[in-house]
Amino acid sequence: MRRIIMLACLLTTSTFAKDAISASVTNFNLMTPVVAVNGNPYAAGNFAVGTIQLFYTVNQYQFTAGQIATFELDLQDVQVNTTGQTPNYPVTLNLTHVGSPNVGLSPSGNNFSVTGPGWSTSTMIAVSIPASVASNPALNADGTDLVGNLQLSTSPQGSKLDTTTTVQVHIRLAYPQSCLRLYNFMTTQDLIQSVTSLQVKLYKNGPKAGQTQNTTPPQLSDNVMVVNTCSVPEVFDLMINIDPSFSSNQGNPVFMYTKSGSSDPSAFNIADFGPGTPKGTAQCFGSITLAPNDTLLTTVHMSIAEFPASQLPASGNFSFSALAAMSGSGCPGTLNTLAVPNPAGLSVPFTIAP
């Protein structure tokens, strides 16, 4: 803060040297920050003398290590006024990361030879979060503000070229509201009758005696529903895991449906959904886009496999799960923090038929 106040004082006096380096920021990529100059709104394309602040917001429950954004820093030698001493050109301009190491700031170039008024150049700045920050619980609280500074300086000492511009980068952690609802429930294969428990029938005679034969009902559907209650479209990966005692049916056992408006298992009616899209045997889906207030339904038609009854789950429950992951992270992927519960589990108790 002391250094920023000193810069502000320099800007309001007439003791500038004849020339100074000013800067502008452009070409934001991956994330777009809010930009201010000396605490005031920033006009894109304008060169600034003073402190340029970039405010990034990360909507997650914790910081993720790695690069989060890039921006271009444009530098220019300008004539501030006609008083003062003329710099001894050429002057070496250095761009260094100073202060806290909690924000990674990596210029594509950080040493430049300034030849005089009108000189200009650009360098791309990569903004990243160090692993030490992502793994530090104290720095992953809601509202944490990480700050990094890029300082301009000249050499040799006494070159008389002012460097009164500082680039300050803020990264704020804002916990998101969980607005993706994830459900996992079972019905008969026709998606009409809810199934909350099963009876397992065994072969009584012949070479398969003592093995599983079917269930009551025999043809089932594991259903995964995602409801987007967010105010914007959400993109996510989806993985479905059926209990290993079951196998998906032949042909196209997996279908995907969408519905305008929200739903939940208690109000589920397949007639409310559009025609299903066959997905073959896939149980991992990447980069699904779901519009605000829409519902996605994915169904897996299945039946119990044949195996010795001794291999049935000792718990007396079949277990199913579904997981929503960050878009592009694959299966199982990185948990999407907007989804609750995540993963969504389903436990179906069973008994063996007499």
Image (spheres, grey):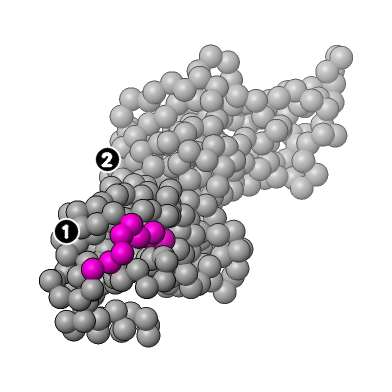
Question: Circle 1 sits on which residue?
Answer: 46
Quadrant of the rendered image containing residue 154: bottom left
- Residues in magenta, as a range: 86-95
Quadrant of the rendered image containing residue 25: bottom left
Callout 1: SS: loop
Left of 152 or right of it: where is 117? left
Q: How far across and how far down the image is residue 29, in percent?
A: 34, 47
Q: How far across and how far down the image is residue 108, in percent?
A: 43, 48
> Is 333 situated above or below 26?
above
Q: Residue at x 20, y 58 (%)?
A: 117
Residue type pointed to by label 2: Ser
> Is 239 situated above or below 145?
above
Q: How far across and how far down the image is residue 89, in percent?
A: 31, 59
Q: Residue at x 55, y 30 (%)?
A: 283
Q: How far across and how far down the image is residue 123, in percent?
A: 36, 50
Q: Is residue 245 found inside the magenta-colored segment of the image?
A: no
